[in-house]
Amino acid sequence: EYRVSQVGGLRDLRKLTLSMRQMWSMGLLERDPDLWGTQFHSILAQPWTCFVVALIALPFGFNHGSRNATAGLASSLVIVFGFFALQRFFHALGVGGKIEPWISAWVPNLVFSGLGIGMILRCR
């Protein structure tokens, strides 16, 4: 509560980060389970984002002969942008209470992991 009371404005609020232990000890998960539950699960799912992006990027590193480098770069950027857009969309659904908090954090990772694995399996 001391850290939250020190917030003076929007700029300070953006810098405010709470660890999962602090969220748990302050009882935030019980106060607003949609908002803080989504935040909690987003913190758990965030490190896996690096793995998901690597799974998506791996097929573009294979030699495709007829494809040029620009097409590979453009399509990979579109896919990664789509991943982050889907991640923010599901986060908004979770904070709004439309879906369960754990679903909002993990579905984008699962969908794009499947997409990356599927693209890897198609490469020869």
Image (cartoon, grey):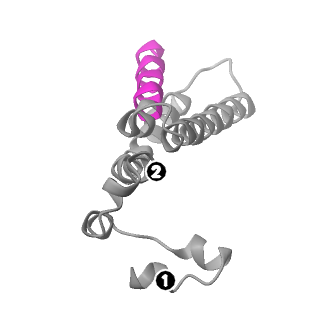
Query: In the image, residue 67 lies at what x, y percent?
Result: 68, 21
Amino acid, disc 2: Leu
The numbered mark, 2 or 1, whose residue comes first in the sequence reads 1
Q: Which image quarter: residue 101?
A: top left
Depth order, front residue of 105/32 = 32
Depth order, front residue of 122/39 = 39
Depth order, front residue of 39/64 = 39
Q: Which residues are magenta?
A: 108-124
Image quarter where the N terminus lies is bottom left
**Rendered position, 22 above or below 65:** below
Look at the numbered disc 2 and give the secondary structure of its residue.
helix
Q: Please tell me whether residue 114 belongs to the stretch shown in magenta.
A: yes
Amino acid, disc 1: Ser
Q: Main secondary structure of the magenta part?
A: helix
Q: Which residue is mark 1?
A: 5
Give the residue at the far front of this rendering.
31
Q: Residues within 10 Å of mark 2 (few under 14, many from 20)?
A: some
* Residue 18 placement, left or right of 112: left
Query: In the image, residue 48 lies at what x, y percent?
Result: 37, 45
Query: Residue, x 27% and y 63% (percent of image)?
Result: 24
Q: Residues within 10 Å of mark 1 (few under 14, many from 20)?
A: few
| Marking on residue 35 | 2
Depth order, front residue of 65/15 = 15
Query: Residue, x 73% and y 28% (percent of image)?
Result: 71
Q: Are marks 2 and 1 in contact (CB under 8 Å)?
A: no
Q: Which image quarter: residue 111?
A: top left
* Residue 76 placement, left or right of 62: right
Look at the numbered disc 1 and give the secondary structure of its residue.
helix
Query: Residue, x 55% and y 75% (percent of image)?
Result: 15
**How many marks do you count on the picture?**
2
